[in-house]
Image: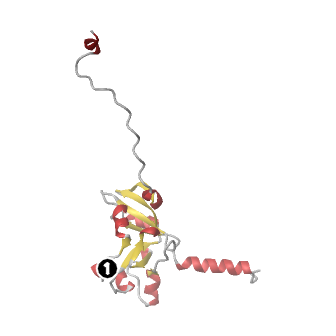
Amino acid sequence: MFARSPFTFFLSFLVLLSSATAAKLFRMDDRTPAAVRAAGGLVSWNPAGTGSVLDHGRAKLGKDDPWVSTTSSKALAKSGAKSASSVYVYTIDPKSPNKLEIVDLDKQFKKAGEENPHPGEKEFSVHKAIPWANIVSWDTMTRGKKTATTTRVDFEKPASPAPPKSPTSPKKSGRSMQEFTA
């Protein structure tokens, strides 16, 4: 029934490959897309830091943290977007155009024989930074409600030039045309 056909092998390979890294990652952040773009992407507190991903998961690194937290759950990322001001839920492609250095935090804790202090976060930690080019789009959120969705491609399009102004009629000076023709 389950003969070793090339097709069966290929499907098995795809299943194993897909479980290695989420197809899309998400991050809720209060930095505006313009600020993220100016920084070159979503950059960790300290890209030169040497802290381990386990210490990152334990929240022990503070401003020396070289890891950027993301999640495989868009709903989870959106659930933290309750601010009265705008926050952004960024959608990230972990493989294109730059392959990111990603660690499944839950698997790392299991590998170390430890319990993940935050297993519900479904965290994938990215080392150093998420380049701007890997950000696909973002939802603008205000008080937990999505107010807009923007793609990086649309954001980068040059603004349309303003339409030419139509000629305006001359202002009346308070005198009528009859005064000039009489």
Name the one closer to the observer, 17 or 128: 128
User: Position of 118 compared to 6: left or right?
Assistant: left
User: Position of 102 compared to 42: left or right?
Assistant: right
User: At 57% from the left edge and 76% from the top edge, which residue is drawn?
Assistant: 18
State the image coordinates of residue 74 (x, y, percent, origin top left).
46, 66
User: At 29% from the left edge and 15% from the top edge, which residue is drawn?
Assistant: 177
What is the secondary structure assignment of the residue under circle 1? loop
Q: Which residue is mark 1?
A: 46
Tell me: residue 135, above or below residue 65: above
Quarter of the image with the N terminus in it = bottom right
Visible in this render: residue 29? no
Name the one closer to the observer, 157 or 106: 157
Farthest residue toward the bottom? 113
Tell me: residue 160, above or below residue 107: above
The chosen color scheme is secondary structure
Quarter of the image with the C terminus in it = top left
User: At 25% from the left edge and 12% from the top edge, which residue is drawn?
Assistant: 179
Name the one closer to the observer, 97 or 100: 97
User: At 48% from the left edge and 74% from the top edge, which residue is drawn?
Assistant: 98
State the image coordinates of residue 19 (x, y, percent, origin top left).
55, 78
State the image coordinates of residue 158 (x, y, percent, origin top left).
42, 54
Amino acid type, residue under disc 1 in the picture: Asn
Visible in this render: residue 128? yes
Farthest residue toward the left? 174
Farthest residue toward the front? 181
